[in-house]
Image (cartoon, rainbow, N blue to C red):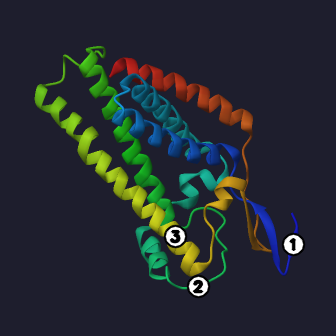
Amino acid sequence: MSENHGERIVAVWDAPTRLFHWLVVALVAAAYATERLNWMDWHARAGYALLAILLFRLVWGLVGSETARFSRFLAAPRGALRHIEHLFRREPDSQVGHNPAGGWMVVALLAILIGQSLSGIYVGNDIADEGPLTESVPAWIADLIEAAHDQWLWNGLLAAIALHIVAIALYAAVKRQNLVLPMVTGVKRLPAGTQAPAIRSLALAAIILACSAGAAAAIVRFL
């Protein structure tokens, strides 16, 4: 890796993590657009694809590259609060992966997206009378699931996305740190002594993705 003025370029994000990130952006946008246009078949397909890559991300967060692992970026809540206290302090970027606050944002977004995907599958199957659970779930629970999908989880997702964008803008404006570009290129310029994180193979990622797609298909049939 090249060095310049005590810094060097470090590969921090692997290709599967970056691809997951931008696919989520595309699929959430597609789900919103197809729902507004009443293209419900395509809306459902976007939800199925989203569930598959979310399952992949959960597994990749356990066995994937170092910066993708939950054990690496999930800090104690106190650590996240301390990080937020320094939000308006301009300082050089020395963070290899997610910062302590950003790690919790990742978990929150994953939880909301999984809830939105699963509730959407149930609602779609309930309407089409396709899933084996559609007749066994009491009406009041079905109504709660539909309300969660159409209102609570969706509004929570919008709020989390807005907060995520605001944080990125603050980092760019106040700290002069670009958080978006590394998620495109996979690399960051960091202090020369920074140790590069371990990166897992693309073959492993492909196997996990295939298994995740199969699991998503099974869940769609079950719900």
Q: Earlier in the sequence, mark 3 or mark 1?
A: 1
Q: Position of residue 110 (x, y in %)?
A: 44, 47
Q: How many marks?
A: 3
Residue 162 seen in render: yes
The residue carrying pointer 3 sits among few (fewer than 14), some (14 to 19) or many (20 or more) residues within 10 Å by Cα, namely some
Q: Earlier in the sequence, mark 1 or mark 2?
A: 1
Name the residue furthest bottom.
89
Nearer-the-camera pick, 53 or 103: 53
**Residue linked to disc 1:** 3
Name the residue furthest front.
37
Q: What kind of element bears circle 2? A: loop
> How far apart, in angstroms, are the residues tagged by discs 1 and 2?
23 Å
Q: What kind of element bears circle 3? A: helix
> Quarter holding the C terminus?
top left
**Residue linked to disc 3:** 169
At label 3, the amino acid type is Ala
Q: Residue at x 62, y 47 (%)?
A: 17
Nearer-the-camera pick, 15 or 68: 15
Q: Residue at x 45, y 42 (%)?
A: 28
